[in-house]
Amino acid sequence: MNTKKIIAIVCGGDSSEHDVSLRSAQGIDSFLDKERFEVFIVEITGLQWEAHLKDGKTVAVSREDFSFKAGRRVIHPDFAYITIHGTPGENGILQGYFDLIRMPYSTSGVLVEAMTFNKFTLNQYLKGFGVSVSESLVVRKGNEELVTDDEIINHIGLPCFVKPNAGGSSFGVTKVKTMDQLRPAIHLAMNESDEVMVEAFMPGTELTCGCYKVAGKEVVFPVTEVVTHNEFFDYDAKYNGDVDEITPAGIDDDLRDRVQELTSAIYDILGCSGIIRVDYIVTKVKDDNGRERNRINMLEINTTPGMTATSFIPQQVRAAGLDIKDVLTDIIEDKL
């Protein structure tokens, strides 16, 4: 009799990072403890939900109870490990579904996922807790003409970033340097999201830090410094190697400790669950005495961070001297 818990790694989704999600699923599959878990990959594309079987075949997954057939067996997963980058796995939609069918899953709940997916909403919320973020505004589809280019630039300044406000990918992001680039950048971002965020550019050092907390254990991973060879950390930098990722980051101990403490605090403020990764830009500012100090500005939160062997979280797990297999076991068994 098989006593292993059945884990469904849920991947795919409806964003431009569908295929990236499949690579994360393969990574998670390779990391999971097969002595403890029986693992299946479930790919979601719109209303097409399919489980990948060991023989290479795919079978339909019931949306009624998330079950599927493997030969003569009817598989009822015990746990969903969500690794969709974008909708519906990173914005609360899939979490709501799993709540309805009473299946535990790896991420935060509906509210946290919806809030962290909406960059502008997240920024405004965390500002109330003293977290430093860039100045920004939102342009909504159908209401693009309510704010003029002059008004945007006067409020945000140049250069600035134009990005999908609700999106889990690096697609549709533009660094705008001149006024005439602004409106085309907004239209490009509209292809990825009905809301577009225009965000002030902050020159500085880009850092990222992961964290997870389960019953009786809190783990904040070493900090990674991101040095892109491109204008910014775009799709090519993220996935085609046009970047240097330094883990642990070559920063002083005080800055490292502050980044890790802020990451842990953000986790608690939001009431997160599972693994998150928080991205930052560290800028230089002067205090009242004219002394230069580091200001840590939050960029965004990833609640389903990439999980290939070379992704940030596996890098940070290795740098911490931990085994990714044990980390994933922590996440799963905390919910079972």
Image (cartoon, rainbow, N blue to C red):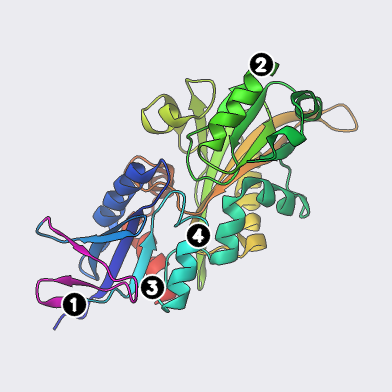
In the image, taking residue 236 as reference, residue 146 lies left or right, namely: right
Given this view, does label 2 or label 4 mark the residue nearer the observer? Answer: 2
Chain-order first, disc 1 or disc 4: 1
In the rendering, which numbered label is found on residue 7?
none
| Pointers 3 and 2 in contact (C-beta within 8 Å) | no
Question: Residue 257: image x %, image y %?
Answer: 62, 46
Res 163 quadrant in image: top right
**Residue 74: numbered disc:** 1
Which quadrant is home to the N terminus? bottom left
Q: Which mark is residue 212?
A: 4
Density class for disc 1 (Cα within 10 Å; few <14, some 14-19, many ≥20) is: few
Q: Residue at x 50, y 73 (%)?
A: 215
Cα separation between marks 1 and 4:
33 Å
In 3D space, how far apart are the residues under numbered discs 3 and 4 (Cα atoms)? 13 Å
- The span shown in magenta is 56-73
Q: Earlier in the sequence, mark 2 or mark 4?
A: 2
Q: Nearer the viewer, mark 3 or mark 1?
A: 1
For the residues labelled 3 and 1, say whether their Cβ atoms are less than 8 Å apart.
Answer: no
- Residue 189 on image: x %, y %: 55, 34
Q: Amino acid at mark 3?
A: Glu
- Given residues 136 and 206, the one toward you in this image is 136
- Kindly identify which residue carries mark 2: 180
Q: What separation in Å lies between label 3 and label 1 (alpha carbons)?
A: 23 Å
